[in-house]
Structures are given as structure tokens and as C-alpha cells.
Amino acid sequence: MDPGKSRDSAETARVMQFPNDVLERILSLIDSHRDRSAVSLVSKAWYNAERWTRRHVFIGNCYAVLPQIVARRFPNIRGVMLKGKPRFSDFNMVPPNWGADVHAWLAVFADQYPLLEELRLKRMTVTDESLKFLARKFRNFRALSLVSCDGFSTDGLEAIATDCRHLTELDIQENGIDDISGNWLSCFPENFTSLEVLNFASLSSDVNFDALERLVSQCKSLKILKVNKNITLEQLQRLLVRAPQLTELGTGSFLQELTAHQYVELERAFISCKNLHALSGLWEATTLYLPVLYPACTELTFLNLSYAALQSEELAKLVAHCPHLQRLWVLDTVEDVGLEAVASNCPLLEELRVFPADPYDQDINRGVTESGFLAVSLGCRKLHYVLYFCRQMTNAAVARIVQNCPGFTHFRLCIMKPGQPDYLTNEPMDEGFGAVVKTCTNLRRLGVSGLLTDLTFEYIGRYAKNLETLSVAFAEGSDRGMQCILDGCPKMRKLEIRDSPFGNVALLSGLEKYESMRSLWMSACKVTLSGCKLLARQRPRLNVEVMKDEVDDGQSYKVYVYRTLAGPRTDAPSFVCTL
């Protein structure tokens, strides 16, 4: 053995041999899940220290591991983040009653983690019974976040409000909730004061405003308040007067007509909000009342207008008061002129999301184009995250955009019409996306659209070495395209493909790859049942789930492939076949 290497190994081992209490103290300061996972691989001592000191765990797929395994691995957990259904469930591509029920997890947590304080769920099925169980079993519970979940009603929220006496956060976002009534807010105890985050923006029914006002008045540490669109401007003013300390606000509807006195009072309420840095809601906002927001905009870093169909002039006047804006979400009703105003007024912008106001109407000519995107890339050179729905695009524009902003880590371009080429040259969009992966070397997430051939995927495989998530829709080409991705992207974790020509050869080209990825989704592709069976036979540590696709030929399948320590799931419905 080389004496130099031997000395280095000995020195490394000596440095790593901290006393257990010192090592555990050091590890308790590390919050990143990835960093903690890396630390656990250093040595057996570090593994054990990381095991005992971990307080929060993230599980990206509820079927990738059993809750009992998680509890054995990490005995002192206080907070859990758990994801369920595939992301395409957001687009109604996963059938109802697919699974991802949280209750089995809660039953284990009640036994193993009685001191659980925090639960964050995304795309999970959560019943009222589960929420009642949660409220009853975890007496020190503090934070509940439900994002894109389904299966529960406001009856479940009543249980949380009634029994979670130490609650600091109740965050209900974009859920399929049965909104029975708004009386759940009155279930908080009369002396309740601990709430710091309250978000019920996605609920549709009227709430008990007296109960809401009392709650806001009593919770002096409340920092985030997002109400639903049924809250009027007059009611919003009353809430702001009682909570000027807010840092994030989601407003209700702007449709109410105000008297001159009410307008002045609302304006004063916004002026008093000195700490506001995030603003959302603004349902049915119009030119008439937008000016009341201006005094509160000077320190905003996040403006979410995805529920406000603002026109270009309205957006221009608003962003003129937002010099520190870093994140902006808008509807495409702002058009290119509105985005040009963003470019002129928001030099610190880092994230832009432009959503379609009407995604299903292909005949609409208005919206945003390459011109608006180009303008933002010129005026906002710190831009590194984009989700951009548009009606048209060119390769040259995409190339110029990434030249202006080469630091993109997330680049999702959604050309609304499937298979749309460069509208000026009629060429595929290969060179545009080629420019993205060549220029943006730190790219981690990519969404491609338009007319695509194998060349796009050759570019991705050759240059996108840090890519972790790729979404593909309505591609052309052959199996070679998918092969290039699987062979060339060493950090790929999630691959999502729909309505593309990839078949069994493409699917099976990933045999060496899938066990290092979190998941693969394919729908309306050319994969057959025999190809899926072959994959399952050759890689038994993968769950290969097949669902019949709703297409005319009767031979197409939705395929969901993911690595797992749990084996085939036991709660699969009849339309899901696990091979």
C-alpha cells in the first residue's frame, strides 16, 4: 500500500472520530435532507448519530418505503413531509381513488412518534377520519399543511381547530375539499393565541367572519394570512387593522364597491403593513381599487397574481411600485406589454411564472409570445426559474433568452398547441432547447414542448449533466430520443412523458437507470403490456404499475415505475395492475 495514502486514511479516520455528544450536536445544526443523507454515509458512527438527531424527514413517494421502516431508521422524528400521487394527477391524468391514503402512515406515527409536531402532505388522500385521528393522537401537534390533497371536508378542519391546542400553522392549498360550511373557524378555543400561519384561500364557502376576526386579533404572532375570495374589501380592512405585523397576505375579492371613506380606511390599513413581502389573491381586481395596494408594494419580494386576470396597463402600474420583486406569478392576460413593464421595473426578478387564463381554448390569439419573454430576460438578468405558457415561440428567441440569463436552474416552456414548430421558420424546436441545455449548465428541471425530434433529446443527453427532472409532452421522433436521455443524464430523478412515440425499446433502455431514479411516468406512448412485464421481471426492486389508458386503440397504458423498499402496494384499486 502507498504509505502516503495510508497516512491520509488514518488522518481522515482520526478527524471523523468525534465524541458522540459532540458529533450529535454538530449534526443537529444540519437542516438539509441531502446533506444529512450524505453525512450518514461517512461511517457507522456518523450513521448512528444522524439517525438519532434527525428531527424532520422527507418522503418523496409514499409507496417507496413502509412507515415502519422509516420509524426504525429515524426514531426521534418531529416533522414529516410526505408526497403521494404522481405529479400528472394535477392534470387529471391519474384516475380517482388511485390511492395514497395517509391513514396507514398516521397509525404508525401514533405508535412510534407520539411527539409528532408537523405534517406536510402533498397529493395525498386525507379523510375526515384521518384528520380527527391526527387531532386526537398527537397532543403536541403544531403544523398541518395540505397541498393538492383530497378526500376530506371542513368537518375534518373542525377537528383540527378543536383539538390541536398548540397549532401554529394551518395551510390548506389547492385541495379537493368538500366545503360543507365555514363554521370550522369558530371551533378554535376562545383563548387560542398560537397561530402563525393561516391559509384557507382555496376554500369556496363563506366563513364565520366574526370567528376569523377574533382569531386574527388574538394571534399576535400571526405572520401569514391568506383568505378566500368570499372575504370582502371591507372585511379585509378590519383584518389588516388587527394584524399589521403580517409578512404574507392573500386577499379576498376586489369586486365590492367602496364608499370614499371605506377606500381611505383600506388604504390606511395597507400603509400600516410595513413588513409585507408577499401578496396574493386579488380576485377580480380592477384598476379602480388596485391603487390601495401601492403603499404596501415597496418591500414586496413575491407577487402572486395567478387568480387576478390583470390587463397589461394594470400590471404596469402595479409593478412600478415593486422595485424589490424577486418572484412573480401572472396570467397571460397581461400580454407582452405587461411583461415589458416587469422588465423595466423589476431588475431583481429571479422567478417568473405565466399561466394561461384559458388553457383549453386553442383559438384564442391573445396571450404572451416570445417578445414578452425576451423583454424579461433583458431586464431581469437574475432570472433563473421560469414556467412560461405561450401561444408561439421561435428557436432564435429561446437562444437569446438563455444567453441573457444563463443561470437558469428551472426552465419550463409550454407552447400551448401540441407539436407547434418555430412559427417563423416552421422548423422543430430542437435548436432552441439545445441552446437551453448547452448554455444553462446548472439546469435541474426542464419542461419541453412544441415540435420536437430526436435531436432535442440528443442535446439533452449530451449537455444536461445536472438535470434532475424532465417533462416531455407531444414529442415526435423514435425510441432513440428517450434512450439518449436515460444514457446521458446521470442525475435524472424524475422523468415524465405523455403523448410521445416512445415504446418498449425506449422503456427497457433504462434498466440500469430506474433504480437510481425516484420515478418514471409514461402515458399515451407506445409501451405495451409485454414490455412492462419484462421490465418488472428484470428489475424486481421496482414497482411497475400499469393502468389502461383512455385512447381509441385500446392498447395504450399509463405506466408508473418507481423504486421501492416496500414491495407491491396492498391498496391498489382494481384498475391498477402491479407487475
Image (cartoon, rainbow, N blue to C red):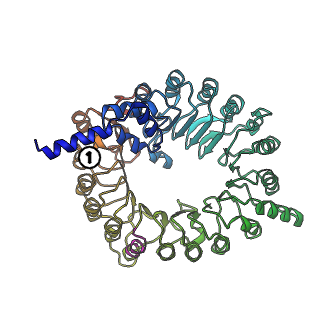
**378 and 390: which is toward the camera:** 378
Q: Is residue 17 above or below residue 300?
A: above
User: Which quadrant of the rendered structure holds the C terminus?
Assistant: top left
Q: Is residue 491 above or below residue 393?
A: above
User: What is the x, y in percent for residue 525?
Assistant: 32, 50
User: What is the x, y in percent for residue 145?
Assistant: 59, 41
Q: Quadrant of residue 141?
A: top right
User: Which quadrant of the rendered structure holds the N terminus?
Assistant: top left
Q: Quadrant of residue 275?
A: bottom right
**194 and 99: which is toward the camera:** 194
Write the residue at 58% across / 28% down: 130
Q: Does residue 201 appear to the left or right of 235 in the view shown?
A: left
Predominant secondary structure in magenta?
A: helix
Write the residue at 26% across / 51% down: 486
Q: Does residue 426 appear to the left or right of 228 in the view shown?
A: left
User: What is the x, y in percent for residue 172?
Assistant: 62, 43
Q: Is residue 144 visible?
A: yes
| Mark 1, residue position | 507
User: Mark 1 is on which residue type?
Assistant: Leu
Residue 14 highlighted magenta (yes or no): no
* Residue stretch rendered in magenta on the structure: 398-406
